[in-house]
Amino acid sequence: MEGMKEIYASIVILIIALIFFGFKDQITTGIARITGFTEWSDVTQASVTVNEFISATLFNVPIQFGNLNPGTTNQEATNNPLEVQVGGETNVNYNITLNGTSDFVNDTNTFSISNLEFNTTSLDWTSYELNVEKTAYANQPAPAGTPVNNSIWHRISVPAGQIAGTYTANITVTVKKA
Amino acid sequence: MKLDRFVGFGLLIFILATFSIEYGFAQSCGFGATPLTAHASAIPGQKVVVTWNLYNMYSDRKAHIVLSYTADTDWEVTIEPDLRNVSYELPTGIVTIQENLALDPLPPVEYKPEVIPYGTSYIKHPNADLYIPAKVVTFTIQVPQDAKVGESHKFHFVAKGNCFTGTGAVIPSVELGLDVTIDVVPQEFYEREIIAKAPWYIRYAGTIIVLVLIALAAAIVVLVRRRKVK
């Protein structure tokens, strides 16, 4: 029987091809998985969150200027400075910002909050602007158990010709985590 | 004799003046807060309850607190206690203000009381073996049902404190804040390894091998037939 060996060989090859075709996915997926193999480690983590505290107390409030004539310029507050005391329990670095939240008002008469200026140990005189936050102290270190005073001086200029009366304005002192 | 009276009167005036100066300038207003940041994971439809402790350890006046918030989303937020009108009797008359709560000046204590009233707490002092009496504020954030898994939103809560400190040209208030971040997560936790993609000749190796084997078998069959023909 001439050529029988070749026929047997081709049948064997076809069977191998069919078997391979049946397990094609498992074989190729196995190859692919090796490329994405990750390491395994048995390290266990422990985590704890330490709560943050912040407190602020204002001393020498409200800010007073007494009786002034229209046209007076750069008159300092009679009870300067405003002290912003950050409590000793504060355990974060902090910023202090100031925001003028109203103009000076007396019934229907007003004058701008921009007539009020502040200064600190590290800043020159800076004018308030209505509803604009201005930084007074930036990135101050957390007090280590002892309260820290941050002094803020104020001065005012009364516009010439301003109608007489008792005027008041509001500011907000914000102490926030730096 | 006259000199003694003069000295006595002078001393009296000095004591009264000193007292009135101290009384006049002892005004202080402020409060404290803990914590300052919070992070939560929530599933769509869940309510996230955030508690915030406010205390008044240092000022000599009651701090009247107004709470508010800003957020980068319009999710429903409720604040407890509610904002309400409260009337106070002062030496100058009755004043009505809006506030969420008022913080009386209270020093830290050595021991927590056995019964702690609703809405108050005693926080461990971070520097001393004491407890700080505090009032608890609650913010409830409703995560909507249609919130998408993976999205994250930030909320900034603010407590603004004012005191009755008498008349003056400029009335300052104190403001402290709490930052809350909420991540929307799926209900069930899962972890799937992302398998790296193999190169094309490996992905199609099976097909290539099968085709080669079939071609080989076909070639053998053709060769056998040619031999038979010869």
Image (cartoon, rainbow, N blue to C red):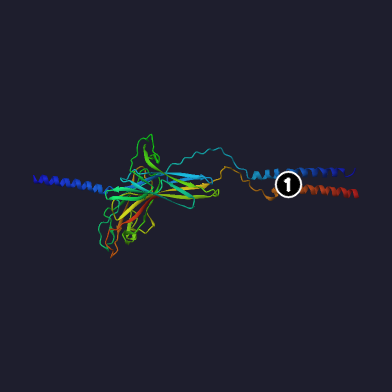
Q: Which residue is mark 1?
A: B206
Farthest residue, direction left = B1
Q: Does dot 1 land on a helix, a strand or a loop?
A: helix
The total of numbered circles placed on residues is: 1
Q: Position of residue A44 (x, y in %)?
A: 53, 38
Rendered view: A37 above or below A151: above
Residue A88: which quarter of the image? top left
- Position of B50 with respect to B203 (left or right) is left
Hey, what amino acid is under mark 1? Gly
Q: Which chain is mark 1 on?
A: B
Quadrant containing the N terminus of chain A is: top right
- Packing grade of label 1 (10 A; few <14, some 14-19, many >=20) is many
Rendered view: B194 above or below A116: above
Residue A168: which quarter of the image? bottom left
Farthest residue, direction bottom = A161
Is residue A85 in sight in this rendering?
no
Is residue B134 in sight in this rendering?
yes
Farthest residue, direction top = B114
Q: Position of residue A75 (x, y in %)?
A: 27, 59
Task: Give the camera-side residue of B92 and A72.
Answer: B92
